[in-house]
């Protein structure tokens, strides 16, 4: 029996955990803020950073589960070399690496805030603010692969395929942060469409 709800559940949990992680972590200092402000923030919010890093890691784990289900869903309807759906796997792995790098830095900032000097905290804060290229490349690869596969197979609406490709291209531009935000909505939309399609499949196959 197909468990059509597994992929949507993983996607929804990933989005929820990402949102909670950002809310718990709060607005971190800018890279040009003073040493005193940066040190004070992390020493006053050390537990929040630890919790945010844990939530981000769990969200990434569920995102990988969602991505693997999406890859299976797309691969099953591809008739050629399946290169597009392979990009979904590669992109999700790159995204996971980038996200867990952020999680690791946030955990370090929270766990060692009282033991590190202001200069070290400033350096880690700068990395936590600007080391976004692995995530951006992962989002680009993931969305380009998913969008191309949708357009090639028609397994999901064509408009969604074009929107996905456009978002993928924009992920490597200055508006990449907003693409990351849009990724959450995209995951929810795709999760619902996959659930509807896979739930209806047994009914169509029944005598």
Image (cartoon, grey):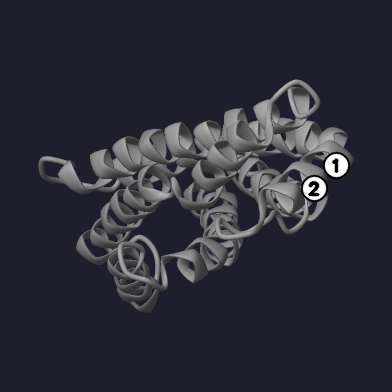
- Residue at the image point whose x is 29% and y is 50% from the top: 141
Measured along the vertical axis of the image, is residue 77 above or below residue 86? below
Task: Tell which residue pokes out farthest to the left in this image.
Answer: 81
Instruction: From the viewer's perspective, tell me whether residue 172 is left or right of residue 156.
Output: left
Place of residue 138 in the rendered image (x, y in percent of width and height, measured from the top left): 36, 46
* Dot in front, 2 or 1: 2
Of 80 and 105, which appears nearest the observer?
A: 105
Question: Is residue 62 in view from this perspective?
Answer: no
Place of residue 182 in the rendered image (x, y in percent of width and height, measured from the top left): 53, 68
- Residue at the image point whose x is 52% and y is 54% from the top: 194
Say what secondary structure mark 1 lies in.
Answer: loop
Which part of the image, by quadrant, shows the N terminus?
top right
Measured along the vertical axis of the image, is residue 155 above or below residue 100? below
Task: Tell which residue pokes out farthest to the bottom in this image.
Answer: 159
* Number of marks present in the image shown: 2
Q: Residues within 10 Å of mark 2 (few under 14, many from 20)?
A: some
Answer whether labels 2 and 1 touch (C-beta < 8 Å): yes
- Residue at the image point whose x is 75% and y is 48% from the top: 36
Instruction: From the viewer's perspective, tell me whether residue 169 is left or right of residue 79.
Output: right
Measured along the vertical axis of the image, is residue 109 above or below residue 73? above
- Kindly identify which residue carries mark 1: 45
Place of residue 113 in the rendered image (x, y in percent of width and height, measured from the top left): 76, 29
Of 148 and 192, which appears nearest the observer?
A: 148
Q: Marks 2/1: CA distance?
A: 6 Å
Say what secondary structure mark 2 lies in.
Answer: helix
Instruction: From the viewer's perspective, tell me whether residue 131 is left or right of residue 20.
Output: left
Question: Is residue 7 in view from this perspective?
Answer: yes
- Kindly identify which residue carries mark 2: 41
- Residue at the image point whose x is 81% and y is 45% from the top: 40
């Amino acid at each position: 029996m197909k468990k059509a709800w597994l992929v949507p559940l993983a996607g929804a949990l990933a989005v929820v955990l990402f949102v909670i992680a950002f809310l718990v972590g709060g607005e971190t200092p800018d890279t040009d803020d003073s040493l005193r402000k940066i040190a004070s923030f992390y020493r006053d919010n050390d537990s929040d950073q630890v919790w945010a890093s844990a939530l981000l890691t769990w969200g990434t784990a569920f995102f990988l589960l969602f991505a693997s289900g999406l890859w299976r869903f797309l691969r099953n309807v591809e008739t050629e070399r399946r290169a597009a759906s392979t990009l979904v796997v590669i992109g999700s792995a790159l995204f996971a690496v980038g996200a867990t790098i952020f999680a690791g830095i946030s955990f370090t900032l929270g766990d060692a805030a009282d033991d590190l000097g202001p200069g070290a905290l400033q350096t880690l804060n700068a990395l936590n603010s600007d080391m976004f290229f692995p995530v951006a490349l992962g989002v680009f690869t993931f969305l380009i692969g998913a969008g191309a596969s949708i357009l090639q197979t028609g397994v999901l609406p064509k408009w969604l395929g074009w929107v996905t490709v456009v978002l993928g291209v924009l992920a490597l531009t200055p508006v990449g942060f907003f693409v990351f935000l849009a990724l959450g909505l995209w995951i929810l939309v795709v999760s619902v469409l996959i659930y509807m399609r896979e739930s209806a499949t047994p009914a169509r196959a029944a005598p």
